[in-house]
Image (cartoon, helix red, strand yellow):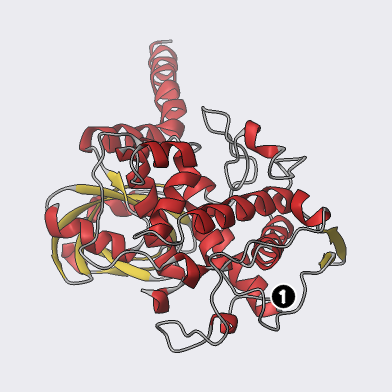
Amino acid sequence: MMKSFVLTSLLALSLPLTLSSAHAETLDFNVEKAQLKAARVDTLDELAVYAKTHVNKSIEMCGTVKGIFSKGSDGFSLMLQIPEGRTLVISAPTELRQNAAISSGKWIRTLCKINGYSGLDVDLQLQNATDKVETKTIDAPEYEDDVVIFTPNTRSAPSPDQILIAPEVNLPPAPKAIQIQGKVIQITPSVSESRGELPSRRAVVPRNQTLQSGGTASANPYFGFTEANRLAYKNLARRNNPRLSDELADQIAGAIISAAQTHNLDPRFLAAVVTVESRFNPYAVSSAGAMGLGQLMPFNLKPLGVGNAWDPMQNLHGSAKMLRQNLNTYSRMENGTLLAVAAYHAGVGAVNRAGYKVPKISTNRYAWKVYYAYKALAPELF
């Protein structure tokens, strides 16, 4: 009888511990992230800038585990592929090897301490990891006014006329529909195009003008409907949002190319904005009511010709149209691209009222996040 009582008592005590452990990993990760005030870093360029002035501080990075290497009594190393496609090695203590999230092939979020840096090489020490996806999008803590701004000590983003693809070059017309895995997806033209209006030529690259990389504006290798191009954007979408189905990732990739080609925009620029806005979650909603991949506000839907903000094709056509308008607006100004991105986040009125400058700290943070995301996708322009 006594044995039965003891056994029952032990089971009763162990049950809540077992139940809570299922949530302990995510809870501990988020609690520790808050305690450490860890800032999220998405690219290696951003990490290099941040590490110069934040040794012994903590960061959050996400990616896919590509390898785990034992270092004997000194712990182990983790090879992480981040969403931009590049990899980095993170050192970890032996006790973290028991973390179930750290498994080859898994997508994880990591908390890391910056031990030191040398150029692009940053010494990172793993502090925690989880495979639970953060649900927040544009309103995540990293965009609040009290966070660090990663402003690089380099030249600014490419000018608007390097991002806009000249409409007078011999590019194939945007198709009326594209076929993805046997499914025909119709491309809905924007309101201005349905009225027969041509895109503005104010900020268009003149014929034969060359980019810094030595190629012409029309030679953008990611512009056009090819299998390789669609696969590149599909992989980018899946790295940022592992929950995407194969079919939906394919659809988003086709929509990026279609929207960019219709509005004569570098598709990598559009992809960079989507990366920062929603991390390729087509159903993302911010607390302010912004919707979908490009986080369009409800009052912008009708002017942009968007009837369904949850449809990737319509959402991205609306986002591309707004970016194109903003790039045209600020094409003759210094840092015109950053102003265009700031206007996408805060509105053209806010940028103009601020004296044609980024209006607030959170928008400045957002603009530089897009800067780093675009630099990762189009390094030849920087």
Dot 1: what SS? Answer: loop
Residue drawn at point x = 38 percent, y = 51 percent: 367
Q: Is residue 44 left or right of residue 266?
A: left
Hey, what amino acid is under mark 1?
Phe
Instruction: Look at the picture and state if 188 lies above or below 160.
Output: above
Report the number of discs: 1
Q: Position of residue 27 (x, y in %)?
A: 38, 32
Instruction: Look at the picture and state if 186 lies above or below 358.
Output: below
Q: Position of residue 262 (x, y in %)?
A: 71, 64
Which of the 4 image quadrants contains residue 77?
A: bottom left
**Residue nearest the viewer, comparing 41 with 103:** 41
**Residue nearest the viewer, comparing 344 with 330:** 330
- State the residue position of label 1: 225
Residue drawn at point x = 41 percent, y = 12 percent: 5
Q: Position of residue 62 (x, y in %)?
A: 40, 54
Q: Quadrant of the N terminus?
A: top left
Q: Is residue 21 left or right of residue 225?
A: left
Neighbour tally class for label 1: few under 14, some 14-19, many 20 plus, Cα within 10 Å: some
Q: Quadrant of the C terminus?
A: bottom left
Residue drawn at point x = 58 percent, y = 59 percent: 237
Instruction: Look at the picture and state if 26 lies above or below 77.
Output: above
Q: Position of residue 180 (x, y in %)?
A: 80, 66
Which of the 4 image quadrants contains residue 89?
A: bottom left
Asked whether the viewer can see residue 148, the reply is: yes
Asked whether the viewer can see residue 129, the reply is: no
**Residue nearest the viewer, comparing 249 with 1:** 249
